[in-house]
Image (cartoon, helix red, strand yellow):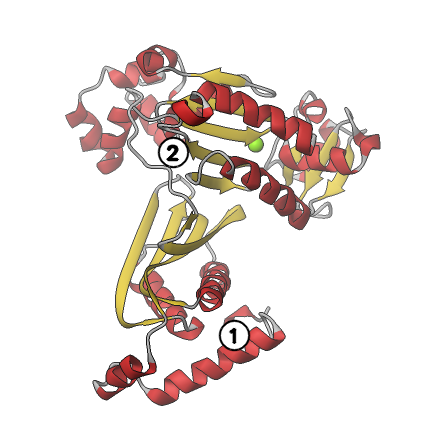
Amino acid sequence: MRKIIHVDMDAFYASVEELDNPGLGGKAVIVGGSLEGRGVVSSASYEARRYGVRSAMPVSRARRLCPHGIFVEARIERYAEVSEQLLRIFKEYTPLVEPVSLDEAYLDVTGLEETLGDAGHIGRQIKKRIKDELGLIASVGIGPNKFLAKLASGLKKPDGFVVIKEEEREEFLTDLPVSKIIGVGRVTEKALYKMRIYTIGELRQRPLDELVENFGKWGNALYYLSRGIDESPVVAEWDPRSVSRSFTFERDVKDLLAIRRELYRLTEDVTGHLKDTGVKARTITVKIRYSNFKTITRSITIVPPTDLTEMVWRHVDTLLKEKVTLKDKAVRLVGVTLSNLAPAVTEEFEQLCLFKGLNTSLDEKLQRAADRITKKYGSGSLKKGLLLP
Ligand SMILES: [Mg+2]
């Protein structure tokens, strides 16, 4: 049986602002993407929440609800810095850490009982260290899978600590509204209501056939999730056999250009890492997570292996265009993974590839030159057309 910990920071952005400006402590702090015009709230302290202020609400509305609130513009870089510190703590316990966003991560601590203690012990330690070392409060949930661990971390927020045991999972779920299931958004919820399904317990009563008929593959997932069954693995961002980077948009996007821009940046990032470590990759994978948390990956394996930004980008872009359905779907996260790594090949091998027409020398030379310029003068010195505003 697996042991998964989900750590979720409480009112993360607002808490970091309080940390950096002690005068804000205990006040109604509201962090917005932009405080003018059409900005939305990205985080609100628990004091602000008492007045009904919520994430994703227009800042203008938050001002009406909480006129004495302290409105602060978001400083994503600072939050990313604190997020790195969090990851460093998590990785002292296990390399199997999957960050979901700046303030949330899954840890797979299966099999660590003998060395580090059971999941409950590790979870408590992590919670305490976040408080002692970073001065921040986290809610921690523990369960036999990701779904239940995340559910657990949300049950007693803020400062929560909840363990769901394997044998308690159905009992925990029975009376909860279906919206508590990861991926059940307003659309699914509405469809379930039409079928007179309001709680997870009611969902569990329905046969698999009926759910598949109504929701396709997603119906299959609902059938198992309603029983607290979720086999999805914790996927570490760092794996010595691959290099992976992902980016979660502050708000879900439908704009293809914005998606391509981020994918290009991630491509620069992963290929830069390959060059630093002297390896090349054979397999290129694009990851897209939609707003309903459905995640798809599309891969291609190429010969010869490469570490060239433009080469990888061309494949990433092609995978996106040909293998990913974006039409009208909002995207929450994008990622690029390079795997099937091999030490940078010898010149001899490269020449063999050239000889066999597997590469064009001019192309390769141009790209090498471009990569050298980027390396020397930093990312952005050679801006791709698509990156220009
Ligand atoms: Mg949070």
User: Cβ(mark 1) to ligand 1 < 8 Å?
Assistant: no
Pinpoint residue 231: horizontal percent, then vertical percent.
28, 32
Q: Quadrant of residue 179?
A: top left
Q: Position of residue 372 (x, y in %)?
A: 52, 79
- Residue type at mark 2 is Gly
Q: Regarding ligand 1, which quadrant of the image does it lie in?
A: top right
Question: Which quadrant of the figure has residue 118?
Answer: top left
Q: Amino acid at mark 1?
A: Lys
Q: Mark 2 = which residue? A: 183
Snapshot quadrant of residue 191? top left
- Using the numbered discs, state the Cα–Cα distance from disc 2 to disc 1 in whole angstroms: 35 Å
Residue closest to the eye, 102 or 353: 353
Q: Give yes or no for contact between labels 2 and 1 (Cβ–Cβ under 8 Å).
A: no
Left or right, 56 with respect to 214, comes to: right
Along the viewing direction, whichever of 48 and 6 lies nearer the viewer:
6
Q: Secondary structure at mark 2?
A: loop
Q: Dot 2: few (<14), some (14–19), or many (≥20) neighbours within 10 Å?
A: some
Q: Residue at x 34, y 68 (%)?
A: 315
Q: Quadrant of the N terminus?
A: top left
Q: Is residue 115 visible?
A: yes
Q: Is residue 53 visible?
A: no
- x 68%, y 20%: residue: 50
Q: Residue at x 34, y 11 (%)?
A: 168
Where is residue 305? Give x, y as percent: 31, 70
Front-most of residues 279 and 292: 279
Total number of numbered labels? 2
- Residue projecting furthest to the right: 23
Determine crowd level at label 1: few under 14, some 14-19, many 20+ residues with C-alpha closer than 10 A: few
Answer with mark 2 or mark 1, whichever residue precedes in sequence. 2
Q: Is residue 265 left or right of residue 51?
A: left
Give above or below for 300 relative to 354: above
Residue named by callout 1? 384
